[in-house]
Amino acid sequence: MTKEEAHIRKLLVEVTDPEIPVLSIMDMGIVRDIEIQEEKVHIKITPTYSGCPAMDTIAMEIKYTLEQAGYPTDVELILAPAWTTDWITENGRQKLEAYGIAAPLEESADKQALLGRSKVVKCTNCGSQNTKLVSQFGSTACKALFQCLDCLEPFDYFKCLK
Amino acid sequence: MNDQQALYQYLLLLGDSPMILGHRLSELCGHGPSLETDIALTNISLDLFGQVRNYFQYAAKVQAEGKSEDDIAFLRLAHEHRNVLLTEQPNTDFAHVIGRQMFFDTFHQLLLEALRDSKDEQIAAIAHKSLKEVKYHTRFSSEWVKRLGDGTAESHRRMQDALDHLWPYAGELVQESPLEKQMKQQGIGADLEQIRPLYWERVNAILREATLEVPENSWFQAGGKKGIHTEHLGYILSDLQYMQRAYPNMSW
């Protein structure tokens, strides 16, 4: 990695998802390619969900952040390969949990829930494993709604998307 | 119709049904029967609109007349829309909403699975992306049809009423139009002949589990794919297109 690219990567870590402000777009796995050309930096990003309203803001933030640092920038939205929760980094998963959003489990756990067996999503408030799925659809496209049956607090779960 | 025009029309056909259904679902924002269902229906609407934007952005590029996705979404007349009639049906009650959704989602999932193999790379990419979202939709709507059908006497009666009302619109989804045939032959479109038996099999399995009586009628209303619509579409468009018609060229 060139010095320039390392610098750009460092700058991009500062760009966060406006809906989950603790999470950098680098931790989310949204940035798919960084191409440094002579006159411009070309960044490819991919949406988490097709209808994710945060993508325009994220694209603008990337352009703004890099151009402030003196890199004229183009941002391109690509669809393939489609984003998966596997691209969230370990660091990102820890930040999600600390923020109060349970990190995505394996897909098999979601299938278990489909078959009526409960999947174990740990409560982000008290750590209890005694939780239930309230709704597959939560406050944003990427989240499902859970409730802890011990401390009774509701919490978000970042659904598995593969 | 040359290849480019056919591709453009096919993208409209792919985008129009989710757009009109997405609009119907958006009408329920703040009116869902419970907070969770309200949020789920608007989430599904958002997913559908995201997918529609992908189709229409691509359509605008294919058309190459300097138009945008907004021109395609907001400035066409009723007869230029290729959505199926099912998606125009009103939000009579929750049973109608969820029944309409179940028919569409069941088909939509099969359609996207097929479109993953499209020779057109952008259509294949959109299908891969959308499919992940649509699996959640299918799960939601089919579970609710079962819950209502196999629920109380009242929920069963309402679900059966909704099914009887929606049934004549359930077949158009899998009826192949000349445009779809042409796109299939080019390796770009999905093969509805292959999807049809799977669709009916899945629909029937859901209805059986929901203890609902499957209507025997096998004649279906159609016309949406060639621009002939029910009276509902005009009202939808006057709502959907209001801002662009009243304030031409406005943008956010």
Image (tube, rainbow, N blue to C red):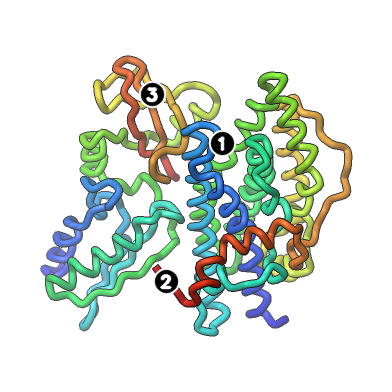
Q: Is residue B229 above or below residue A155?
A: below
Q: Is residue A150 visible?
A: yes
The amino acid on which the numbered mark 2 sits, given as a three-letter code, is: Ser
Which of pointers 1 and 2 lies earlier in the amino acid sequence?
1
Q: Quadrant of residue B222?
A: bottom right
Q: Which residue is mark 2?
A: B251
Depth check, mark 2 against mark 3: the one in front is: 2
Seen in the picture, residue B231 relative to A132 is either above or below; the reply is below
Residue at the top extreme of this rendering = A150
Q: Is residue B53 left or right of residue A158?
A: right
Q: At label 3, which amino acid type do we have?
A: Val
Instruction: Calculate the distance from the C-alpha at mark 1 to the C-alpha at mark 2.
Output: 34 Å
Determine the image quadrant of residue A68.
bottom left
Judging from the image, mark 2 belongs to the subunit labelled: B
Residue tagged by mark 3?
A: A120
Which class describes the residues within 10 Å of circle 2: few (<14), some (14-19), or many (20+)? few
- At x 78%, y 41%, the residue is B165
Q: Is residue B233 left or right of residue B41?
A: right
Q: Residue at 43% across / 58% down in the picture? A: A81
Task: Name the spot of residue B102 as percent of width and height, x first.
Answer: 65, 41
Badge 1: few (under 14), some or many (20 or more) residues near its Cα, within 10 Å? Answer: many
